[in-house]
Image (cartoon, rainbow, N blue to C red):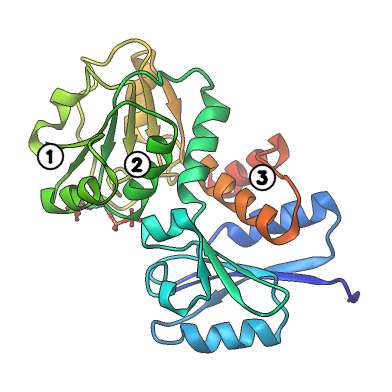
Amino acid sequence: MSIDFKKAAVIGFPIAQSLSPFIHKHWMEAVGIDGDYTAIEVAPGEIAAFIEQAKLDGLSGFNVTVPHKTDIVPLLDKVAPLARQMGAVNTVKINEDSTLTGFNTDGLGLVAHLKNTVSDYPVDKPVLILGAGGAARAAALGLLTENIPMVMISNRTRAKAEVIANDIGRGRMTVVDWDNRADAVSASGLIINTTVLGMDGQARLELDLSAAAKDTVVYDIVYKPLETELLAKAKAQGLRTVDGLGMLVHQGAAAFKLWFGYDVGFDTVLRAKLEAKLS
Ligand code: ATR
């Protein structure tokens, strides 16, 4: 192990299923970093102890996933503006002076993947976001930064969608009743599913796409399965689709840049490796 050995990690509870070690190790090898990225199970209430250990171990930083994204915020020395607006952190950088800065790269990852996959998505039309969890908030923030004219948000529990619209909408978000979500399809240039519906082991996502305009893009952040029923239906109708794998990879790439300074991305070798792992 050289003196320059770099370390990073992802913390969550549970964490065994995380693809992040696989992705970051691929990049470390690609850019020639001698290092390791590990998945560490940290139980609720043990984050502070983990942070102290991470400093002692000389980690460059770590990713944060469910259920710690919000709980970690008060334990950090600095929080970047986007993460502050999200109220959630998914990436922590451990600075030279051992202070910690929190970032949220989820929204940027989502938009980066969208642009890479469909560079000419309809920027002048409203977006329809399904769901109102952390991923929905990240998607809305990311897209509002991109000057999308209006974000419509629809969630089974309407109140949660209203909280997001009030927090970050600044007059550019409207709430659509879950039962009326299909009515919003025809006006939408982009439809994003951020709910768990359609994921292996979860219920189906019911959404009638028949009224969608020809240039509508359908984005599902679910990546298990990689081609969800929603995406298959959109494709069959001739619509362009974006799968959820890239959001995971691009938010990881943003973290990699923060820790190690290298621009990495979704190379074809990485996609092939991940598709093989998920199939
Ligand atoms: P994350 O923070 O990762 O985005 P989450 O907070 O667990 O995930 O959110 C899951 C989303 O899936 C929520 O929008 C949830 O709707 P509720 O807010 O009403 O719970 C949605 N969801 C889960 N099961 C659902 C179901 N059976 N029907 C409709 N929406 C569902």
| Residue occupied by mark 2 | 140
> With 199 as the anchor, is 180 left or right in this view?
left
| Above or below, comparing residue 156 to residue 101 in the picture | above
Mark 1 surroundings within 10 Å by alpha-carbon count, few (fewer than 14), some (14 through 19), many (20 or more): some
> What's the residue type where badge 3 is placed?
Lys
> What's the residue type where badge 2 is placed?
Ala
The residue carrying mark 1 has its beta carbon less than 8 Å from ligand 1: yes
**Residue 173's spot in the image, x, y percent?**
23, 37
- The circle on residue 178 is 1
The residue carrying mark 2 has its beta carbon less than 8 Å from ligand 1: no
Residue 32 falls in which quadrant of the image?
bottom right
| Above or below, comparing residue 158 to residue 81 in the picture | above
Nearest the viewer among 270 and 188 is: 188
Mark 3 surroundings within 10 Å by alpha-carbon count, few (fewer than 14), some (14 through 19), many (20 or more): few
The answer for how far apart the CA atoms under marks 3 and 1 are is: 37 Å
Which type of secondary structure does the marked residue at label 3 adopt?
helix
**Residue 44's spot in the image, x, y percent?**
39, 82
The answer for how far apart the CA atoms under marks 1 and 2 are is: 17 Å
Mark 3 vs 2: CB contact within 8 A: no
Residue 185 falls in which quadrant of the image?
top left
- The circle on residue 273 is 3
Which type of secondary structure does the marked residue at label 2 adopt?
helix
Q: How many marks?
A: 3
Residue at (25% x, 51% y) in the render: 167
Mark toward the start of the polypeptide (1 vs 2): 2
> What's the residue type where badge 1 is placed?
Trp
> Which image quadrant: the N terminus?
bottom right
Q: Tell me, yes or no, if residue 16 can be seen here.
A: no
